[in-house]
Image (spheres, rainbow, N blue to C red):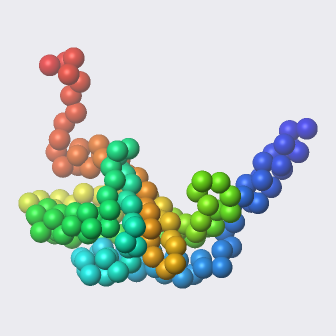
Amino acid sequence: MKPSILFIFILAFFVGCSNAGKNDKANTALVENYIQAVENLDFDAMTEYLDDSYQGLGPSHDDSTTKTEAVENWKYNVENLYESIKYRDSRTIAITENEGVNKGEWVLNWAELEIKYKDSNTPIVIYANTIYLVENGKIVKSHTFYNEADVLEQMGFLFVNPDDL
């Protein structure tokens, strides 16, 4: 009985989510070009790849940005904080969700990021995952996940329980 339940679950997964979308190659190329624009600090290209209705979510639960805010945040970080950002061991895969509230063409990227700050010789290295929703050749939404505490700890911040003060 258990093997048949597992088979039904796997079959339902593959029916609801397909990794064989008709635009997979174009969508993956779009996201890889966007990532290259981020690495090259090419704000004009970033602007081109994001749809006017773009919404960026994460890494924290309440973080949300529009297209204009996202590009301005990158500009601010580069002018004031970052010397460089490099995607190492970056991987992308496209999937098409055929049903439900997340229906659409998605591209998933996971990478090890190396961020060099202007005031530090030591780079920060993080694992980041971003999921991009692509429509009509533009990125309309992204969800970004990484461990913010890890970044702060690498920058020298200490975490102290207030009860221990």
Task: Return the residue nearer the eye: 162 or 14.
Answer: 14
Residue 90 can be seen in this image: no
Residue 33, picture quadrant? bottom left
Q: Using the image, determine if residue 48 lies above or below residue 1.
A: below
68 left or right of 20?
left
Residue 80 visible? The answer is: yes
Marks counted in the figure total 0
Which residue is painted at 86% across and 38% down in the image?
A: 2
Percent position of residue 135, x then y: 52, 73
Extreme residue in the front direction:
53
Q: Nearer the viewer, residue 50 or 80?
A: 50
Residue lying at 73% horizontally and 54% vertically, measured from the top left: 13
Q: Residue at x 51, y 71 (%)?
A: 134
Residue 119 lies, with reference to residue 3, above or below; the image says below
Seen as rendered, the residue at the extreme top is: 163
- In which quadrant is the C terminus drawn? top left
Residue at 49%, 80% (x, y): give it. 137
Task: Please tell me in which quadrant of the rendered image residue 15 appears.
Answer: bottom right
Asked if residue 160 is positioned above or below residue 44 in the image, the reply reads: above
- x and y percent of residue 114 in the render? 29, 64
Classify residue 158 by image quadrant.
top left
Dividing the image into 4 quarters, which one contains the N terminus? top right
Is residue 160 rendered to the left or right of residue 38?
left
